[in-house]
Amino acid sequence: MNLQSDDFELFGLPRQFAQERSAIDARWKELQREAHPDRFAAQGAAAQRVAMQWSVRINEAYQRLKDPMRRAAYLCELHGAPIRAEDNTAMPAQFLMQQMDWREALEEAASAAALDALDDEVASARSAALRQCQQLIDEQRDYAGASRQVRALMFIARFADDIERRRDQQGQ
Amino acid sequence: MALLQISEPGQSPDPHQRRIAVGIDLGTTHSLVAAVRNGVAECLPDGQGRVLLPSVVRYLDNGGRQIGYDAMAEQSQDARNTIASFKRFMGRGLADIAEAGKLPYDFVAPAADAAEGGMVRIATAGGEKSPVELSAEILATLRFRAEDTFNDDLYGAVITVPAYFDDAQRQATKDAARLAGINLLRLINEPTAAAIAYGLDNASEGVYAVYDLGGGTFDISILRLTQGVFEVISTGGDSALGGDDYDAALADWVVQQCNLELVTASDKSAMRVAARACKEALTATDLIAFKADISSARVDFPVKREDFEAITAALTARSMAAVRRALRDAQLSREDIRGVVMVGGSTRMPQIQRAVAEFFGTEPLTNLNPDEVVALGAAIQANQLAGNSTAGDMLLLDVIPLSLGIETMGGLVERIVARNETIPTAKAQDFTTYKDGQTALAIHVVQGERDLVADCRSLARFELRGIPPMAAGAARIRVTFTVDADGLLSVNAREQGSGVEARIDVKPSYGLSDDQIARMLQDGFATAAQDMRTRALVEARVDADRMLIATQSALDADGDVLADDERRKIDLLMQALRSLIDAGNAPDSPDAPDAAAIEVATEALAQGTEAFAAQRMNRGIQQALAGKNVQSL
């Protein structure tokens, strides 16, 4: 166990996609109880610096583990199938069509109810993609396939942000 | 480390080593200091039994100054030199202060060479003052109050800031602590401090909202409480929305209704003071006369509570919009909230309590004094950070309130750290050079949620120098942005290929440079009566003692991880430092060490124990993991 250990080792969790969120949360708090700089506030600068490094590392792992999309991306990376979202934006035509439909619906959404309906649709697409991820990673060990699903999830997440932004605009 | 010393619950290992640690609520309208005494947090009163210290400073012609109630009493007579609500100017430029024209102060435009305009200053009878110096006056006053109460030196303080304070505002607060000669243990967020005071009182578990409307700032925080862990899930707010704005809205309305003209600084100040009195009276009554004497008239105008509520409805609505956004950020709905804690004097207004109760469908918790609750929570945290409380097993996990980003091509923001991420946190970003042989790089860091640099707050420009010269695009410069547990940003950079660490010059957009702070310290700030040299020596010795005690207790607990020669090196460093301190016990002798010598030896010990500290931390983490495995069997 050191600062270079991977997230799963650090959190003492099996290296798989399926995880209990409550177990991740509990583990995070347990680790921070040991490593947080506040535990060393009266112990000089050296302990403070090391505590800070550990605490940062634990938070970094927590951010990745608790978010299913980032967890999937991390597993793909660990298994040699990085996501490369910047230079790999090729998506199946059907997926792109759906994205265009959503964008159109968002343009036209005039009420909170319309945004809610769109939210529901996006949420169910997200769960479907996550189920796919679980199957591809934990059962079929198809990491290249899983990384395609992660790219789809990234599109979906970006669209969910746009819905939020629209909500903010309407709220004003 | 948590597992080291075991003593009677609630008792410090050695009562004589108990450290005086306080919590300070540095508020817009008033400030407080609190400490844990006999296991209970309480606010410390001044000589006349008052716990509130008005955050008002008056500078006199003769170089003197008045602070608190004395200054407040002169506010209308000497409006120009009597500065109030200066927390709103912390880390802000002149252009940021929307109401500058309505305030009775002489704001000074910062020097033309300041990067983004610099922090605003105010011309007074005592010279030009920055809000950092004004805040330091308040902090120093509270520090002396605590030292008088305990008849001992202050070990350190936790100072609270609004959760929605950005990096510049936090840094300004930290600088003020330094000017006041306070060892800052931690900056914590006001709503989090309030949650500590409530949580420990009521032994509550679950998700809570803290609605904190102070004199000048508004915060909303959503927290989860589980077994002594205070986890902030999301936070939001408006660092320029508070009771002052309700006063201003009321004063504006009366001016309009009565067709008044405010000519002098005193007029402006008198209207503000009258508006505040009128607002406060309206919490208990439905109708009150607004009374003020200004140069052109004697104002006596009846104000109904419903009028007041109508003219300030937009302000209340602004706060509720932030509440909704914080809930969305937390991905929770209002039904998930077990209770709402009200903090800040402005939550006494009936319309605020009504709006919050209606939104959450539950009566807000108000059983602790909303003026005191933040200082009390900070005191509990300070007591723990100072190592006095072995019984408490409390942990704060707070978040960064606003996203951090850097400027990229075309004035766009590239997000580095997202808002509501738990701190401390660090993010690395790789950069490369644009020209052959380029050895320097400039990075502009901004804070905010918008996509354009122009719409965000400029924090600082970091200039990286000393990059080894290479062909364009060949250097790989990894820049790490670290946000510490105080919510403060630092930056370091390393060229990956050569391993060369870049030198970094920081140009804060709205802050004070190290030089400016050093100058203020030299000007004898808050220490005018004391000999600087003696003071420096005392401080160096206190630091050295602190370091020795910490190292000894670490050795007692975990000395076994060290090899014999490692142990010997640390023992030698400790001996060297101890003998310097002992020599200092005869300060008149010619070979008595100066502060610098002690500081050098202290730093040598700190560096010499760094590897040991790392080993101890490793052991701690492994123990935590082992604990988990036993449980899950």
Image: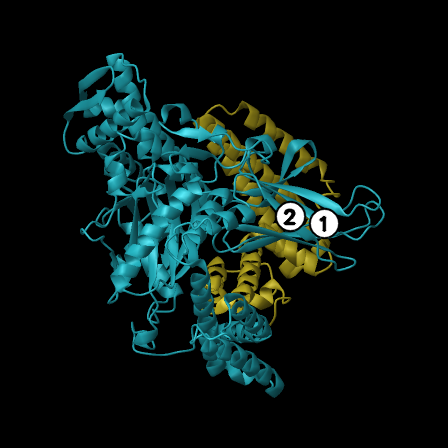
Give the residue drawn at x 32%, y 17%: B263
- Left or right: B118, with B15 as reference point: right
**Residue denoted by label 1:** B465
Visual hue assigned to chain B: cyan
**Residue denoted by label 2:** B505
- Left or right: B63, with A136 as reference point: left
Please tell me how crowded label 2 is: few (under 14), some (14-19), or many (20+) other residues with Cα within 10 Å.
some
Q: Residue furthest bottom?
A: B564
Q: Chain of mark 2?
A: B
Q: Amino acid at mark 2?
A: Asp
Please tell me how crowded label 1 is: few (under 14), some (14-19), or many (20+) other residues with Cα within 10 Å.
some
| Image quadrant assignment for residue B459 | top right
Give the residue drawn at x 38%, y 64%: B155
Give the residue drawn at x 36%, y 47%: B137
Visual hue assigned to chain A: yellow
Q: Amino acid at mark 1?
A: Arg
Nearer-the-camera pick, B415 or B14: B14
The image position of residue B234, as x and y in percent, is 44, 46
Colour scheme of the rendered structure:
by chain
Q: Is residue B204 visible?
A: no
Up the image or down, B183 lies above or below B189; here it is below
